[in-house]
Amino acid sequence: MNKIYQKPFPGDKNAGFTLIELLVVVLIIGILSAVALPQYTKAVEKSRLAEVKILVRRLADEDKLCQLETGGGCLRETGGDRSQMENTVAARAFGMENMVWNDGEAEARMGHWGLRFSSGPLQVIRYQKGNMLYLIECNNGLENLDQQDCWCDNQSGNTNYCALLGLTDKQFSFWSL
């Protein structure tokens, strides 16, 4: 008598997946991860840029408030004097505990970001494990950040963060990021 093949029940000791079924599942997962990972990385970096926009807005607001309160007597730069760091607008905005002295300038360090500004350019620095990865620089400091006067300067040898964020060497508006 011919026996008809039946797939075993789940509780049966012969139940399982064939090698082809497992290979197909692994292949599908590999293709999905190859497509999704670059998009995920880009989304993470864009969310980090949203974070730094909030920090820069906070710094700009504190600068305006300080200018109104003191009639223009706020320190934007230390003039190379570390003792003046606590009197800067950045120290007022973020607290002295978040201030560091870096390359002769006061820098507000908030998580992965460093913000430097003086009478010259605003510099936004991205840190990872203590290394500077990329820098966004805006010529007019905190004034006119909505103008086309910022650029991205990639500082990492491994990853082009500027390209990842869709930024080029062309000038762009900081708030359009």
Image (cartoon, rainbow, N blue to C red):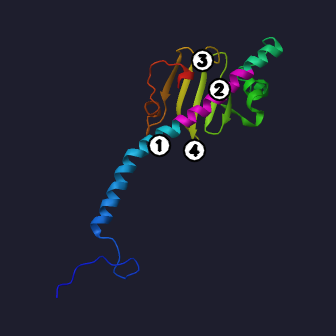
Mark earlier in primary sequence (3, 4): 4
Which residue does the image show at 78% across and 18% down from the upper left?
Answer: 66
Q: CA distance from mark 1 to mark 3?
A: 28 Å
Q: Helix, strand, or loop for circle 3?
A: loop
Q: Amino acid at mark 1?
A: Tyr
Bin the neighbour count of mark 1 within 10 Å (Cα to Cα): few under 14, some 14-19, many 20 and up: few
Is 31 left, or right, of 61 in this rendering?
A: left
Q: Say which mark, if any, is on residue 56.
A: 2
Which residue does the image show at 32% across and 65% down from the upper left?
Answer: 22
Q: Say which mark, if any, is on residue 145.
A: 3
Percent from the top left, x then y, of residue 107? Answer: 67, 30
The residue range painted magenta reads 46-62
Q: Nearer the viewer, mark 4 or mark 2?
A: 2
Mark earlier in primary sequence (4, 2): 2
Is the Cβ of the residue at disc 2 closer than 8 Å to that at disc 3?
A: yes
The number of numbered badges drawn on the structure is: 4
Image: 131 above or below 75 = below
Is 107 left, or right, of 40 in this rendering?
A: right
Q: Say which mark, if any, is on residue 114.
A: none
Q: Helix, strand, or loop for circle 2?
A: helix
Q: CA distance from mark 1 to mark 2?
A: 25 Å
Which residue does the image show at 76% across and 37% down from the upper left?
Answer: 97
Mark earlier in primary sequence (1, 2): 1
In the picture of the structure, the residue carrying the numbered disc 4 is 129
